Image: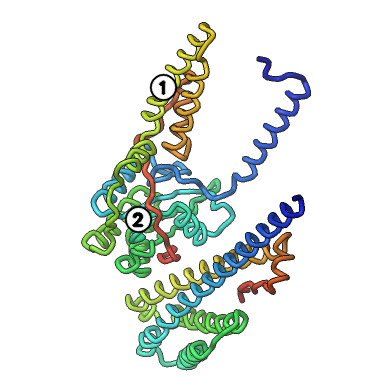
Amino acid sequence: MNLFPSRKGAFLLLALGLLVGIGCLSTASALPELTGYMVNDWVYLLTYEEEEDLEGLCRWIEDQTTVEIYVIITDNLAGEDLDRYSYLVFNDWGIGKEDVNNGLLLTLYYWENTTHFYYEFRIEVGRGMEGTVTDSEAGRIARDNCTLWFDYMYFYEGLYEGIEELYNEFKDDPNVVSTIGNPVGLAAFQLWGYENPLIAGAIVAMGLVMFSLWFQIALRRYRGSFIPLIGIGALLLFAWWWDSTLQVLGYAIIIAIGGTVTVAGGRRVRSGGGRTEGGGFRY
Amino acid sequence: MAVVVVGVGFGAMTIMTYNDLVTAKLEAENKWTYIQIQFERKLDLIPQLVAVVENYTDYEQETLTLITELRTQWLSLNGTPSEQANISTQLNQAFSTLFVAIQENYPTLYADILYQELFDEITGTENRITQAKLDYNDAVTNYNTKLATFPGNLIGGWFGLSPMILYASG
């Protein structure tokens, strides 16, 4: 099969690709997407070990109390001010569980020039946490536990102590504990695929490779080649359904065509859909 | 046959656009109540603030009285956005006068933990109000855009829908 029947066709395809590319570029200043991690250091202020440690702490707290604490360190507020940025990201990502809105977002906006560094810091409190972490509590913790360290560039220490102190505030409060159970059946299966896209992708990829072998054999025998084609299509749809963020599908295709994949980090997390109304404290 | 197809298509388009417009309008009206709720929160903090400040200061009575008066005015107001914005601007000016005065002239009060906490609460409430206002303006703009563009401009005109007013600051 000739993919480009004419030079004109190839040119049109190239132009279309360019258009799509430019379209993607122009949305670069929009809000960040959910990354699958609770600690997101986009300025590289933390070492790898420190980031892993904070991630572990946040996930442990979620295991213990169902409260979701996310951390964002960024040098790009997407054209908003820090308050608005935290508010929008919080609600966009849906931090905290849906039934009790028990989310917390720590946003550290950092920028520097050749001689100085500057930062702004905000603790955004989910709607359901406002009883235990009031604005004044958030203010106290931001002042006494976080920014005290940040002023001397000890960002890990400040974040760790702040999260610890926040945890002490809500750990004994039954009101912030979500009663949404773990998903069962198909939903659990989908969640597993979301959390482990690489393994799920590999499983789908094995199916894809088998079907394509079958397809080649069928081609030689001049019959029944449509069955494996349908199988491939069904598998792709299945991978799409499994994980709507398309990571499973992407990994499956990459593995199936024999690409090598670098694995970043471990399990991904998914937020619970909580809301904020803008409570918290900005330093 | 063709007439029937066009007629059905036209009817469907009318219904869908109208529903879309009404949904957007109700959404914006809901966002308006969010602002009111956050303002109530701020007004509830005022008596506390007055109580804390009164004990410490001798010379800020005027500002405190003004703040209390504005609070009363607000409570007796079934306001349009512009009236509300007017009083809220005055209130904010009185607040900032008071806060600056306290910071400069009453170090013991400024360092007081109760005052500090109250100040954080008021700042936090201000932020909530800001976010609610921005959300309201987003929703109103969304509705107004739908109303101003085709086919919303035609269908909005037939059903007598009018554009909503943005919440202007200051």
- Front residue of B162/B47: it is B162
Tell me the chain of label 2. A
Q: Which residue is drawn at 55% across and 46% down?
A: A114
Ranked by sequence position, the earlier of labels 2 and 1 is 2
Q: Do the residues labelled 2 and 1 touch (CB within 8 Å)?
A: no
Residue furthest toward the right?
A8
Nearer the observer: mark 2 or 1; the answer is 1
Amino acid carrying label 1: it is Gly
| Amino acid tagged 2 | Lys
Secondary element at tag 1: helix
Quadrant in the picture for residue B135: bottom right
Q: Is residue A77 above or below residue B138?
A: above
Does dot 2 land on a helix, a strand or a loop?
loop
**Residue B107 pos. (x, y %):** 39, 79
Please give left or right for residue A248 compared with residue A192 in the image.
right
> Pointer 1 indicates a residue of which chain?
A
Q: Is residue B63 visible?
A: no
Is B127 displayed left or right of B56 in the figure?
A: right
Residue at the location (29% across, 54% down)? Answer: A180
- Residue B15, quarter of picture: bottom right
Badge 1 local density, few (<14 within 10 Å), some, or many (20+)? some
Task: Estimate the spatial distance between the alpha carbons at disc 2 and disc 1, rounded to whole Å.
Answer: 35 Å
Is residue A164 depicted above or below B74 in this figure?
Answer: above
Res. A207 mark: 1
The disc label shown at residue A97, or none: 2
Residue at mark 2 shares a chain with residue at mark 1: yes
Colour option used: rainbow
Is A34 located above or below residue A196 in the figure? below
